[in-house]
Protein backbone atom coordinates (compact mmCIF):
# COMPACT_ATOMS: atom_id res chain seq x y z
CA UNK A 1 0.00 0.00 0.00
CA UNK A 2 1.31 3.42 -0.92
CA UNK A 3 1.89 5.45 2.27
CA UNK A 4 -0.16 8.55 2.93
CA UNK A 5 2.51 11.21 3.26
CA UNK A 6 1.53 14.37 5.08
CA UNK A 7 3.52 17.36 6.23
CA UNK A 8 2.36 20.72 7.53
CA UNK A 9 5.05 22.33 5.41
CA UNK A 10 3.21 21.07 2.33
CA UNK A 11 0.19 23.08 3.41
CA UNK A 12 2.23 26.26 3.12
CA UNK A 13 4.81 25.74 0.42
CA UNK A 14 4.41 22.83 -1.98
CA UNK A 15 7.20 21.42 -4.11
CA UNK A 16 5.81 19.37 -6.97
CA UNK A 17 8.13 16.44 -7.57
CA UNK A 18 8.22 15.36 -11.22
CA UNK A 19 5.37 17.65 -12.25
CA UNK A 20 7.40 19.19 -15.04
CA UNK A 21 8.22 15.92 -16.70
CA UNK A 22 4.90 16.52 -18.45
CA UNK A 23 2.23 16.09 -15.80
CA UNK A 24 0.18 18.98 -14.36
CA UNK A 25 -1.72 19.57 -11.15
CA UNK A 26 -4.45 21.70 -9.60
CA UNK A 27 -4.45 22.23 -5.85
CA UNK A 28 -6.52 24.25 -3.42
CA UNK A 29 -5.18 25.38 -0.07
CA UNK A 30 -7.38 26.73 2.70
CA UNK A 31 -7.04 28.02 6.21
CA UNK A 32 -9.74 28.72 8.81
CA UNK A 33 -8.77 30.69 11.91
CA UNK A 34 -11.11 30.94 14.89
CA UNK A 35 -11.55 34.22 16.74
CA UNK A 36 -11.66 35.03 20.42
CA UNK A 37 -15.16 36.47 20.07
CA UNK A 38 -18.24 34.66 18.71
CA UNK A 39 -17.77 35.76 15.11
CA UNK A 40 -17.34 33.28 12.28
CA UNK A 41 -13.75 32.18 11.65
CA UNK A 42 -11.67 33.92 9.04
CA UNK A 43 -11.47 31.77 5.93
CA UNK A 44 -8.81 32.04 3.20
CA UNK A 45 -8.79 29.94 0.04
CA UNK A 46 -6.15 29.94 -2.71
CA UNK A 47 -6.08 27.83 -5.88
CA UNK A 48 -2.99 26.89 -7.93
CA UNK A 49 -2.55 25.30 -11.34
CA UNK A 50 1.00 23.97 -11.31
CA UNK A 51 2.98 26.90 -9.89
CA UNK A 52 0.52 29.66 -10.81
CA UNK A 53 -2.07 31.08 -8.44
CA UNK A 54 -5.37 31.55 -10.28
CA UNK A 55 -8.10 32.22 -7.65
CA UNK A 56 -8.35 33.58 -4.10
CA UNK A 57 -11.10 34.05 -1.51
CA UNK A 58 -10.86 35.94 1.80
CA UNK A 59 -13.90 36.07 4.07
CA UNK A 60 -12.57 39.31 5.59
CA UNK A 61 -12.33 41.08 2.25
CA UNK A 62 -14.76 43.83 1.31
CA UNK A 63 -16.27 41.87 -1.59
CA UNK A 64 -16.28 38.43 0.09
CA UNK A 65 -16.13 36.90 -3.37
CA UNK A 66 -13.86 34.43 -5.14
CA UNK A 67 -11.51 36.61 -7.17
CA UNK A 68 -9.25 35.91 -10.19
CA UNK A 69 -5.49 35.93 -9.73
CA UNK A 70 -4.44 35.11 -13.29
CA UNK A 71 -5.22 36.99 -16.53
CA UNK A 72 -6.48 33.84 -18.27
CA UNK A 73 -9.28 33.46 -15.72
CA UNK A 74 -11.30 36.13 -17.55
CA UNK A 75 -12.20 33.37 -20.03
CA UNK A 76 -14.50 31.59 -17.55
CA UNK A 77 -18.17 32.57 -17.39
CA UNK A 78 -20.00 34.48 -14.64
CA UNK A 79 -21.67 31.33 -13.34
CA UNK A 80 -18.25 30.02 -12.32
CA UNK A 81 -17.56 33.00 -10.07
CA UNK A 82 -21.01 32.90 -8.48
CA UNK A 83 -20.76 29.17 -7.82
CA UNK A 84 -17.26 29.39 -6.34
CA UNK A 85 -18.25 32.36 -4.18
CA UNK A 86 -21.28 30.59 -2.72
CA UNK A 87 -19.27 27.43 -2.03
CA UNK A 88 -16.61 29.45 -0.21
CA UNK A 89 -19.17 31.31 1.88
CA UNK A 90 -20.77 28.02 2.91
CA UNK A 91 -17.34 26.67 3.76
CA UNK A 92 -16.97 29.37 6.43
CA UNK A 93 -19.91 27.90 8.35
CA UNK A 94 -18.61 24.36 7.81
CA UNK A 95 -15.23 25.35 9.17
CA UNK A 96 -16.86 26.94 12.20
CA UNK A 97 -18.56 23.64 13.03
CA UNK A 98 -15.30 21.77 12.40
CA UNK A 99 -13.37 24.03 14.75
CA UNK A 100 -15.93 23.48 17.50
CA UNK A 101 -15.78 19.70 17.02
CA UNK A 102 -12.01 19.64 17.08
CA UNK A 103 -11.92 21.75 20.22
CA UNK A 104 -14.04 19.09 21.93
CA UNK A 105 -11.91 16.23 20.57
CA UNK A 106 -8.81 17.81 22.13
CA UNK A 107 -10.60 18.80 25.37
CA UNK A 108 -9.85 22.48 24.78
CA UNK A 109 -12.42 23.92 27.16
CA UNK A 110 -11.47 27.58 26.81
CA UNK A 111 -12.13 29.40 23.57
CA UNK A 112 -8.92 30.46 21.89
CA UNK A 113 -7.37 30.94 18.48
CA UNK A 114 -7.22 27.64 16.57
CA UNK A 115 -6.39 26.83 12.95
CA UNK A 116 -7.54 24.21 10.44
CA UNK A 117 -5.54 23.82 7.22
CA UNK A 118 -6.77 21.84 4.24
CA UNK A 119 -5.14 20.92 0.93
CA UNK A 120 -6.67 18.90 -1.89
CA UNK A 121 -6.43 18.49 -5.64
CA UNK A 122 -5.45 16.25 -8.53
CA UNK A 123 -2.58 15.53 -10.89
CA UNK A 124 -2.82 14.33 -14.49
CA UNK A 125 -0.51 12.52 -16.90
CA UNK A 126 0.80 14.27 -20.04
CA UNK A 127 -2.08 12.70 -22.02
CA UNK A 128 -4.64 14.35 -19.70
CA UNK A 129 -5.74 11.22 -17.84
CA UNK A 130 -6.01 11.07 -14.05
CA UNK A 131 -2.73 10.32 -12.26
CA UNK A 132 -3.40 10.88 -8.55
CA UNK A 133 -5.57 12.73 -6.08
CA UNK A 134 -4.71 14.10 -2.66
CA UNK A 135 -6.45 15.54 0.37
CA UNK A 136 -5.05 16.26 3.81
CA UNK A 137 -5.79 18.27 6.93
CA UNK A 138 -3.83 19.79 9.79
CA UNK A 139 -5.01 21.26 13.09
CA UNK A 140 -3.07 23.84 15.08
CA UNK A 141 0.06 23.19 13.08
CA UNK A 142 0.03 19.39 13.37
CA UNK A 143 -0.91 16.76 10.80
CA UNK A 144 -4.44 15.51 11.47
CA UNK A 145 -5.88 13.22 8.77
CA UNK A 146 -5.35 12.41 5.09
CA UNK A 147 -6.97 10.50 2.26
CA UNK A 148 -5.08 7.57 0.76
CA UNK A 149 -5.24 8.06 -3.01
CA UNK A 150 -5.06 4.34 -3.83
CA UNK A 151 -7.94 2.94 -1.78
CA UNK A 152 -9.69 6.21 -0.78
CA UNK A 153 -9.58 5.31 2.88
CA UNK A 154 -8.97 7.96 5.54
CA UNK A 155 -5.78 7.66 7.59
CA UNK A 156 -5.85 9.20 11.06
CA UNK A 157 -2.45 10.80 11.66
CA UNK A 158 -3.35 12.00 15.15
CA UNK A 159 -5.25 9.84 17.68
CA UNK A 160 -8.06 12.41 17.93
CA UNK A 161 -8.58 12.19 14.17
CA UNK A 162 -10.22 8.77 14.65
CA UNK A 163 -13.41 10.71 15.49
CA UNK A 164 -13.42 12.39 12.08
CA UNK A 165 -12.43 9.17 10.33
CA UNK A 166 -15.43 7.27 11.74
CA UNK A 167 -17.84 10.08 11.01
CA UNK A 168 -16.71 10.51 7.40
CA UNK A 169 -16.70 6.77 6.68
CA UNK A 170 -20.27 6.46 7.94
CA UNK A 171 -21.34 9.27 5.65
CA UNK A 172 -19.40 7.94 2.62
CA UNK A 173 -17.45 11.17 2.37
CA UNK A 174 -14.56 9.40 0.63
CA UNK A 175 -16.83 8.34 -2.27
CA UNK A 176 -17.72 11.97 -2.92
CA UNK A 177 -14.06 12.96 -2.76
CA UNK A 178 -13.15 10.18 -5.23
CA UNK A 179 -15.72 11.46 -7.74
CA UNK A 180 -14.44 15.01 -7.40
CA UNK A 181 -10.72 14.19 -7.58
CA UNK A 182 -10.93 11.75 -10.51
CA UNK A 183 -13.56 13.54 -12.61
CA UNK A 184 -14.48 17.13 -11.73
CA UNK A 185 -10.98 18.18 -10.73
CA UNK A 186 -9.46 16.71 -13.90
CA UNK A 187 -12.00 18.41 -16.17
CA UNK A 188 -11.37 21.83 -14.62
CA UNK A 189 -7.62 21.36 -14.68
CA UNK A 190 -7.72 20.62 -18.41
CA UNK A 191 -9.91 23.67 -18.97
CA UNK A 192 -7.53 25.94 -17.05
CA UNK A 193 -4.53 24.55 -18.92
CA UNK A 194 -6.22 25.34 -22.22
CA UNK A 195 -7.21 28.86 -21.16
CA UNK A 196 -3.79 29.67 -19.71
CA UNK A 197 -1.53 27.68 -22.04
CA UNK A 198 0.60 30.73 -22.97
CA UNK A 199 1.64 31.03 -19.32
CA UNK A 200 1.24 27.53 -17.91
CA UNK A 201 2.92 25.60 -20.73
CA UNK A 202 5.87 27.93 -21.29
CA UNK A 203 9.49 27.26 -20.28
CA UNK A 204 11.99 29.95 -19.22
CA UNK A 205 15.64 28.85 -18.86
CA UNK A 206 17.53 29.83 -15.69
CA UNK A 207 20.39 32.29 -15.53
CA UNK A 208 23.00 31.02 -13.09
CA UNK A 209 26.28 32.09 -11.52
CA UNK A 210 28.71 30.98 -8.80
CA UNK A 211 29.91 33.33 -6.05
CA UNK A 212 32.57 32.88 -3.36
CA UNK A 213 32.10 33.85 0.30
CA UNK A 214 34.62 33.75 3.17
CA UNK A 215 33.58 32.93 6.73
CA UNK A 216 35.03 34.36 9.97
CA UNK A 217 36.91 31.11 10.64
CA UNK A 218 38.57 31.19 7.22
CA UNK A 219 36.25 28.61 5.68
CA UNK A 220 35.20 29.22 2.09
CA UNK A 221 31.66 28.78 0.74
CA UNK A 222 30.74 28.62 -2.93
CA UNK A 223 27.13 29.46 -3.74
CA UNK A 224 25.43 28.44 -6.98
CA UNK A 225 22.41 30.63 -7.66
CA UNK A 226 19.81 30.22 -10.41
CA UNK A 227 17.04 32.69 -11.16
CA UNK A 228 14.49 33.67 -13.80
CA UNK A 229 13.39 30.10 -14.56
CA UNK A 230 9.95 28.54 -15.13
CA UNK A 231 8.55 26.04 -14.29
CA UNK A 232 9.71 25.76 -10.69
CA UNK A 233 11.22 22.25 -10.85
CA UNK A 234 15.01 22.57 -11.05
CA UNK A 235 18.09 20.63 -9.95
CA UNK A 236 21.22 22.29 -8.54
CA UNK A 237 24.02 19.90 -7.65
CA UNK A 238 27.57 20.54 -6.43
CA UNK A 239 30.26 18.13 -7.64
CA UNK A 240 33.82 17.74 -6.37
CA UNK A 241 36.16 16.18 -8.90
CA UNK A 242 33.04 15.07 -10.77
CA UNK A 243 31.37 13.35 -7.79
CA UNK A 244 28.09 14.60 -6.30
CA UNK A 245 28.30 16.24 -2.87
CA UNK A 246 24.84 15.67 -1.40
CA UNK A 247 25.73 15.55 2.29
CA UNK A 248 27.92 18.65 2.23
CA UNK A 249 25.50 20.81 0.25
CA UNK A 250 23.10 23.33 1.76
CA UNK A 251 19.93 24.05 -0.24
CA UNK A 252 17.14 26.56 0.00
CA UNK A 253 13.70 25.65 -1.30
CA UNK A 254 12.70 27.02 -4.67
CA UNK A 255 11.17 30.47 -4.18
CA UNK A 256 9.02 32.73 -6.37
CA UNK A 257 10.91 35.60 -7.93
CA UNK A 258 7.98 38.03 -7.90
CA UNK A 259 7.76 38.21 -11.69
CA UNK A 260 6.25 34.81 -12.48
CA UNK A 261 9.62 33.03 -12.44
CA UNK A 262 11.54 31.26 -9.67
CA UNK A 263 14.92 31.29 -7.93
CA UNK A 264 17.03 28.82 -5.95
CA UNK A 265 20.56 28.41 -4.62
CA UNK A 266 22.82 25.67 -3.30
CA UNK A 267 25.98 26.23 -1.26
CA UNK A 268 28.97 24.05 -0.39
CA UNK A 269 31.72 24.74 2.18
CA UNK A 270 35.40 23.86 1.77
CA UNK A 271 38.93 24.75 2.85
CA UNK A 272 40.59 27.67 1.03
CA UNK A 273 42.38 26.66 -2.15
CA UNK A 274 39.95 23.87 -3.05
CA UNK A 275 37.59 25.99 -5.14
CA UNK A 276 38.80 24.74 -8.52
CA UNK A 277 37.79 21.16 -7.61
CA UNK A 278 34.11 22.11 -7.41
CA UNK A 279 31.55 22.62 -10.16
CA UNK A 280 27.81 23.31 -10.06
CA UNK A 281 25.46 21.37 -12.35
CA UNK A 282 22.16 23.04 -13.24
CA UNK A 283 19.38 20.98 -14.84
CA UNK A 284 16.04 22.41 -16.01
CA UNK A 285 13.37 21.54 -18.54
CA UNK A 286 14.12 24.68 -20.58
CA UNK A 287 17.81 23.77 -21.00
CA UNK A 288 18.84 21.62 -23.95
CA UNK A 289 21.65 20.23 -21.78
CA UNK A 290 22.75 20.81 -18.16
CA UNK A 291 24.89 23.82 -17.29
CA UNK A 292 28.26 23.27 -15.62
CA UNK A 293 29.52 26.30 -13.69
CA UNK A 294 32.70 26.96 -11.71
CA UNK A 295 33.87 29.92 -9.67
CA UNK A 296 35.93 32.23 -11.83
CA UNK A 297 38.42 34.39 -9.84
CA UNK A 298 38.85 36.68 -12.82
CA UNK A 299 35.18 37.54 -12.82
CA UNK A 300 35.35 38.35 -9.12
CA UNK A 301 38.38 40.57 -9.75
CA UNK A 302 36.36 42.56 -12.28
CA UNK A 303 33.66 43.18 -9.68
CA UNK A 304 36.30 44.28 -7.18
CA UNK A 305 37.83 46.64 -9.71
CA UNK A 306 34.43 48.11 -10.53
CA UNK A 307 33.72 48.57 -6.83
CA UNK A 308 37.10 50.24 -6.17
CA UNK A 309 36.71 52.50 -9.20
CA UNK A 310 33.26 53.51 -8.07
CA UNK A 311 34.58 54.22 -4.57
CA UNK A 312 37.41 56.37 -5.92
CA UNK A 313 34.96 58.25 -8.15
CA UNK A 314 32.68 58.94 -5.20
CA UNK A 315 35.66 60.17 -3.14
CA UNK A 316 36.83 62.44 -5.94
CA UNK A 317 33.29 63.77 -6.43
CA UNK A 318 33.03 64.52 -2.73
CA UNK A 319 36.36 66.40 -2.76
CA UNK A 320 35.31 68.42 -5.82
CA UNK A 321 31.95 69.20 -4.26
CA UNK A 322 33.70 70.44 -1.10
CA UNK A 323 36.04 72.60 -3.15
CA UNK A 324 33.11 74.05 -5.11
CA UNK A 325 31.21 74.87 -1.92
CA UNK A 326 34.31 76.48 -0.41
CA UNK A 327 34.90 78.52 -3.56
CA UNK A 328 31.27 79.62 -3.66
CA UNK A 329 31.38 80.65 -0.03
CA UNK A 330 34.62 82.58 -0.53
CA UNK A 331 33.30 84.29 -3.67
CA UNK A 332 29.85 84.99 -2.36
CA UNK A 333 28.32 82.49 -4.75
CA UNK A 334 29.25 84.51 -7.85
CA UNK A 335 32.15 82.40 -9.10
CA UNK A 336 31.85 80.22 -12.18
CA UNK A 337 31.67 76.47 -11.57
CA UNK A 338 32.77 73.78 -14.03
CA UNK A 339 30.31 70.85 -14.19
CA UNK A 340 31.54 67.62 -15.88
CA UNK A 341 29.41 66.30 -18.74
CA UNK A 342 26.97 63.53 -17.93
CA UNK A 343 28.72 61.24 -20.35
CA UNK A 344 31.84 61.27 -18.16
CA UNK A 345 29.99 59.62 -15.28
CA UNK A 346 29.62 56.15 -16.79
CA UNK A 347 31.40 54.37 -13.96
CA UNK A 348 29.07 55.77 -11.37
CA UNK A 349 26.09 54.85 -13.53
CA UNK A 350 27.29 51.25 -13.68
CA UNK A 351 27.57 51.08 -9.90
CA UNK A 352 24.03 52.40 -9.48
CA UNK A 353 22.77 49.79 -11.92
CA UNK A 354 24.45 47.00 -9.97
CA UNK A 355 22.95 48.24 -6.73
CA UNK A 356 19.46 48.35 -8.22
CA UNK A 357 19.87 44.81 -9.52
CA UNK A 358 20.88 43.57 -6.09
CA UNK A 359 17.93 45.32 -4.46
CA UNK A 360 15.57 43.74 -6.99
CA UNK A 361 16.94 40.28 -6.10
CA UNK A 362 16.40 40.89 -2.37
CA UNK A 363 12.86 42.15 -2.89
CA UNK A 364 12.02 39.12 -5.02
CA UNK A 365 13.24 36.87 -2.24
CA UNK A 366 10.73 38.46 0.16
CA UNK A 367 7.80 37.01 -1.74
CA UNK A 368 7.37 33.53 -0.21
CA UNK A 369 4.27 31.74 -1.47
CA UNK A 370 1.87 30.66 1.21
CA UNK A 371 -0.76 28.42 -0.32
CA UNK A 372 -3.59 28.23 1.94
CA UNK A 373 -9.62 26.14 0.09
CA UNK A 374 -12.88 24.68 0.45
CA UNK A 375 -13.66 22.33 3.33
CA UNK A 376 -16.27 19.96 1.96
CA UNK A 377 -17.23 18.58 5.33
CA UNK A 378 -16.88 19.44 8.99
CA UNK A 379 -14.38 17.46 11.04
Image: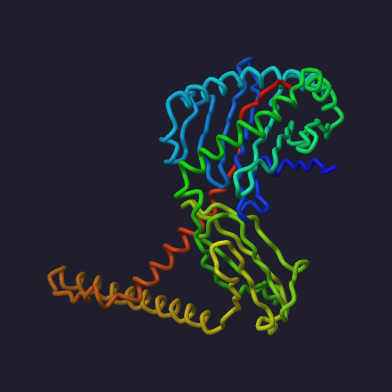
> What colouring style does the render use?
rainbow
Image quadrant where residue 106 sits: top right
Horizontally, residue 275 falls left or right of residue 310, namely right
Question: Above or below — where is 345 with respect to 140?
Answer: below
Residue at 74%, 23% in the rendered image:
173
Residue at 27%, 76% in the rendered image:
323
Q: Nearer the viewer, residue 89 or 127?
A: 127
Residue at 35%, 73% in the rendered image:
348
Image quadrant where residue 208 sits: bottom right
Question: Above or below — where is 133 with respect to 314?
Answer: above
The x and y percentages for residue 156 are 83, 31
Q: Nearer the viewer, residue 305 or 207?
A: 207
The x and y percentages for residue 289 are 58, 71
Q: Quadrant of the N terminus?
A: top right
Residue at 69%, 70% in the rendered image:
268
Question: Above or below — where is 86 with respect to 22?
Answer: above
Horizontally, residue 114 falls left or right of residue 348, namely right
Q: How many marks?
A: 0
The x and y percentages for residue 319 are 32, 76
The x and y percentages for residue 215 are 67, 72
Horizontally, residue 198 falls left or right of residue 344, namely right
Horizontally, residue 78 falls left or right of residue 342, namely right
Amino acid sequence: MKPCIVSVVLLEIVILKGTWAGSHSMRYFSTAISRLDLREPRFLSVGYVDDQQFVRFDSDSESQRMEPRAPWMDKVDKDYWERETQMSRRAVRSYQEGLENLRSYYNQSERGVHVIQHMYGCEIFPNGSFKSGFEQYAYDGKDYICLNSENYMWTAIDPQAVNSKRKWEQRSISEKEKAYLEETCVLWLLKHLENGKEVLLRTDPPSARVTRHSGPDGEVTLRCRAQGFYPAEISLMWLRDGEEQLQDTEFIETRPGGDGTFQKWAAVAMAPGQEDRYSCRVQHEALAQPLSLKWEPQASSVWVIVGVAAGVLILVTAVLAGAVMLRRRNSGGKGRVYVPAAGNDSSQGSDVSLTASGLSWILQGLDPRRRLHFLSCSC
